[in-house]
């Protein structure tokens, strides 16, 4: 509720102290007005203004669109900022509002949705009700969700699968039982093993996330995590601890075996080590992650060699082509190549416009012209791109 209360007085800086939930600098000092009031009834909020986003670019990338059905996290993990941001009490949107929003997204052409709640499966009855409503309305789409290993059961996963769920992600964080207790994760290694088994039984792809650099981390605790990954035979990610302000692990770092080495927030992306423990340096941690990922790197190198030599299977060729597609699309989107190269073709037909744009993009991305043209044509056919022959340009479809 902070923003709508602040907006009417944002020109009147002297009134800011009366608005709970903001921090600002005044005369070189930080002023903090305390915690703001959380929105209690999520149904009162309007839907996200997705029409203000360049949705055609999202569609072209082929990634899921996100949906939030609840706020709040009841768990007490010492490394997590989520609880501090959204509160410990879980607040829910109603089932009808959620499914209405899903139906609207699917009607807009989004057939993959990621439910980005901190913990989608906090209330099993609600999950079942959402799944039943999706099935009753016959909404056909693929979706994923963030869950916890101690909230999964064979029954709940069956409901999710029937409603179109294809994958779930859960944080295991460590394969060491003592470490799990230290970080107050509230789960056990056995629950993680069981969750992976239940997901495979339900034909839902599980993904496990682990953290490197937790308080008291040692070579032994990291090896326990890697051993668990191999035992579970699961897709996985290792992410470096980012001790954000507001987390227990940062606010009470002195009470833990942890030294925070950097306040450069650009490094707080979980992709590099910004802490050390008494047993591990940042380079130790980064070497471990490299070793953990090496089997994936080696397997991919072998696959690409087989495909290049003409020995790859149909599935391997599909995987290789998909990576080429993602690399090309990422290059186009991250460098705004459509915006920069889509104009200046006066007097050209639609086919000539597509060819000229494709040639420019191919030159800038070093991808084959035929591959670039294939996707440009596909985006035009799917109406992600709009051709304006009279103006001699091609651009992303406007909302």
Image: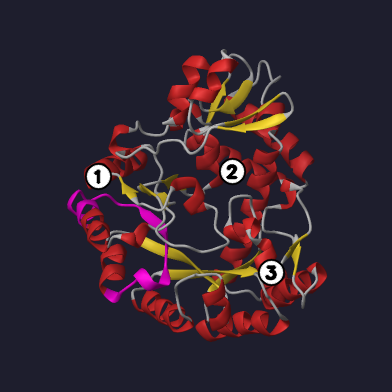
In 3D space, how far apart are the residues under numbered discs 1 and 2 (Cα atoms)? 39 Å
Neighbor class of circle 2 (other Cα within 10 Å; few <14, some 14-19, many 20+) is some
Q: Position of residue 6 (x, y in %)?
A: 49, 22
Q: Residue at x 55, y 37 (%)?
A: 57
Q: Nearer the viewer, residue 93 or 298?
A: 93
Confirm whether the magenta stretch covers residue 140. yes
Residue holding disc 2: 375
Disc with the residue nearer the chain's start (1 vs 2): 1
Q: Position of residue 30 (x, y in %)?
A: 66, 33
Disc with the residue nearer the chain's start (3 vs 1): 1
In 3D space, how far apart are the residues under numbered discs 3 and 1 (Cα atoms)? 39 Å
Neighbor class of circle 3 (other Cα within 10 Å; few <14, some 14-19, many 20+) is many
Disc with the residue nearer the chain's start (3 vs 2): 3
Q: Nearer the viewer, mark 1 or mark 2?
A: 1
Helix, strand or loop at disc 1? loop
Q: Nearer the viewer, residue 358 or 295?
A: 295
* Position above or below: 178 against 207: below
Residue 213: image tag: 3
Confirm whether the magenta stretch covers residue 242. no
Magenta segment range?
Answer: 132-154
* Position above or below: 74 against 381: below
* Position above or below: 196 against 128: below
In 3D space, how far apart are the residues under numbered discs 3 and 2 (Cα atoms)? 42 Å
Residue holding disc 1: 94
Q: Nearer the viewer, residue 81 or 191?
A: 81
* Position above or below: 158 against 141: below
């Amino acid at each position: 509720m902070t923003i709508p209360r602040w907006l009417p007085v944002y020109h009147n800086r002297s009134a800011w102290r009366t608005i709970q939930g903001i921090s600002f600098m005044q005369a070189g000092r930080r002023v903090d007005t305390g915690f703001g009031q959380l929105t209690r009834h999520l149904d009162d909020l309007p839907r996200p203004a997705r029409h203000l986003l360049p949705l055609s670019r999202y569609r072209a990338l082929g990634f899921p669109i996100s949906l939030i059905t609840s706020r709040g996290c009841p768990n007490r993990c010492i490394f997590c900022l989520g609880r501090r941001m959204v509160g410990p009490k879980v607040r829910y949107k109603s089932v009808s509002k959620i499914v209405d929003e899903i139906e609207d997204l699917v009607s807009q052409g989004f057939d993959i949705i990621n439910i980005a709640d901190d913990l989608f499966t906090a209330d099993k009855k609600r999950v079942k009700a959402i799944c039943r409503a999706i099935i009753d309305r016959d909404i056909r789409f693929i979706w994923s969700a963030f869950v916890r290993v101690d909230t999964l059961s064979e029954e709940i996963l069956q409901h999710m699968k029937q409603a179109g769920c294809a994958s779930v992600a859960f944080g295991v964080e460590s394969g060491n039982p003592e470490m799990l207790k230290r970080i107050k994760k509230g789960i056990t290694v056995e629950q993680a093993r069981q969750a992976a088994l239940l997901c495979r039984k339900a034909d839902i792809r599980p993904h496990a996330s682990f953290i490197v650099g937790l308080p008291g981390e040692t070579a032994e605790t990291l090896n326990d995590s890697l051993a668990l990954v191999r035992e579970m035979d699961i897709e996985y990610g290792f992410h470096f601890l980012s001790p954000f302000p507001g987390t227990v692990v940062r606010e009470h770092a002195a009470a833990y075996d942890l030294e925070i080495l950097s306040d450069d927030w650009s490094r707080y992306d979980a992709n590099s080590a910004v802490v050390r423990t008494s047993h591990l340096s940042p380079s130790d941690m980064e070497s471990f992650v490299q070793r953990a990922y090496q089997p994936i790197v080696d397997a991919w190198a072998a696959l690409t060699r087989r495909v290049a030599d003409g020995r790859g299977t149909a599935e391997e060729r599909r995987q290789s082509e998909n990576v080429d597609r993602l690399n090309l699309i990422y290059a186009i989107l991250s460098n705004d190549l459509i915006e920069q190269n889509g104009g200046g073709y006066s007097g050209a037909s639609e086919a000539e416009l597509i060819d000229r744009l494709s040639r420019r993009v191919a030159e800038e991305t070093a991808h084959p012209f035929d591959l670039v043209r294939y996707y440009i044509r596909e985006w035009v056919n799917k109406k992600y791109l709009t051709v304006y022959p009279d103006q001699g340009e091609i651009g992303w479809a406007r909302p």
